[in-house]
Amino acid sequence: MALTKKFLKTKPVCKVTFAIAAAEADTVAVAGDFNNWDTTRPLKKLKNGTFKGTFDIPTEKSYEFKYVVDGEWVNEEAADGYQWNDYAAAENSVLEL
């Protein structure tokens, strides 16, 4: 799994690319504070089995998120941190921008 961040100089936005290896999966989405936990926009599956997608996310904030791999919620191993979430009764990945 991987996260890449590209901060824009012209506006307070970061282009964040989420990538997760899930060759056996049919669908993968990323859901978090930055998209109101929307699981309806799947990431694109590449030929090598990795699912990948880029989002423009406002900076100077931290966000909780998780991947949804065929309906199963999964944390990002390379997250900036982890935060306990009472609603989910589990830790969520944290993205620091």
Image: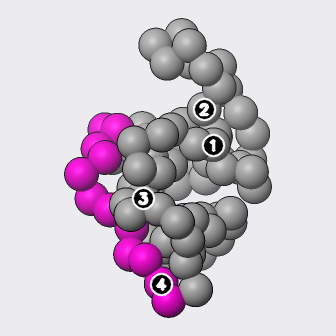
In this view, the residue farthest toward the front is 24
Looking at the rendering, which quadrant does residue 23 occupy? bottom right
Q: Residue at x 75, y 55 (%)?
A: 78
* Whether residue 22 is situated above or below residue 68 in the rendered picture: below
Residue 12 falls inside the magenta stretch: no
Q: Earlier in the sequence, mark 4 or mark 2?
A: 4
Q: Secondary structure at mark 3?
A: strand
Q: Earlier in the sequence, mark 3 or mark 2?
A: 3
The nearer-to-camera label among 4 and 2 is: 4
The part of the chain drawn in magenta is 36-47
Residues at discs 2 and 1 in contact (Cβ within 8 Å): yes
Q: Residues within 10 Å of mark 3 (few under 14, many from 20)?
A: many
Would you say residue 13 is visible in this rendering?
A: no
Q: Which mark is residue 28?
A: 3
Q: Nearer the viewer, residue 44 or 60?
A: 44
Q: Which mark is residue 64?
A: none
Q: CA distance from mark 4 to mark 1?
A: 20 Å
> Magenta region, mostly helix, strand or loop?
loop
Q: Which residue is mark 1?
A: 75
Q: Position of residue 84 (x, y in %)?
A: 65, 19
Q: Secondary structure at mark 2?
A: strand
Q: CA distance from mark 4 to mark 2?
A: 25 Å
Image quadrant in which the N terminus is located: bottom right
Residues at discs 4 and 2 in contact (Cβ within 8 Å): no
Residues at discs 1 and 3 in contact (Cβ within 8 Å): no
Would you say residue 81 is visible in this rendering?
A: yes
Q: Which residue is mark 4?
A: 46
Q: Earlier in the sequence, mark 2 or mark 1?
A: 1
The nearer-to-camera label among 3 and 2 is: 3
Q: CA distance from mark 1 to mark 3?
A: 12 Å
